[in-house]
Amino acid sequence: MGEKLDTVLSRARYAAIGAAVGGGLGGLFGRSTASSGAALGGLVGAAVGEKRVSARSMIEQVRNRESSEE
């Protein structure tokens, strides 16, 4: 349950950051571009957030295997 919650929170955090950055960059060009940039940034951020948690959990599994073998 804890790992799933970590994934959800990480995805939401990175989606919000991506949307803010995308909206800000798109806002330099126009209002509709800001909206599209925010949507695209949110999608990219969500994907990054999910992959980041997956990589972190894999690293922890490898570390736990190494410490249990000692």
Image (cartoon, rainbow, N blue to C red):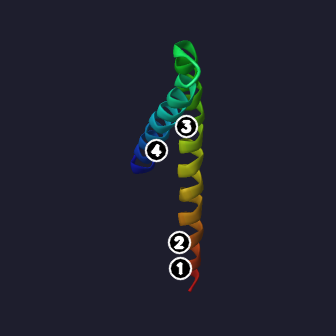
> Which residue is denoted by mark 2 in the rendering?
64
**Distance between the alpha carbons at the discs numbered 2 and 1:** 5 Å
Q: CA distance from mark 4 to mark 3?
A: 9 Å
Contact (CB < 8 A) between labels 4 and 2?
A: no
Mark 4 or mark 2: name the one nearer the start of the chain. Answer: 4
Q: Amino acid at mark 3?
A: Gly
Distance from label 3 to label 1 (Cα)? 33 Å
Image location (x, y in percent) of residue 40: 59, 26
Q: Residue at x 53, y 79 (%)?
A: 67
Q: Which mark is residue 67?
A: 1
Given residues 35 and 55, the one toward you in this image is 35
Residue with the mark numbered 3? 45
Q: Secondary structure at mark 2?
A: helix
Give amino acid for label 4. Ser
Distance CA(mark 1)–CA(mark 4): 27 Å
Q: Residue furthest front?
A: 28
The tag earlier along the polypeptide, 2 or 3, is: 3
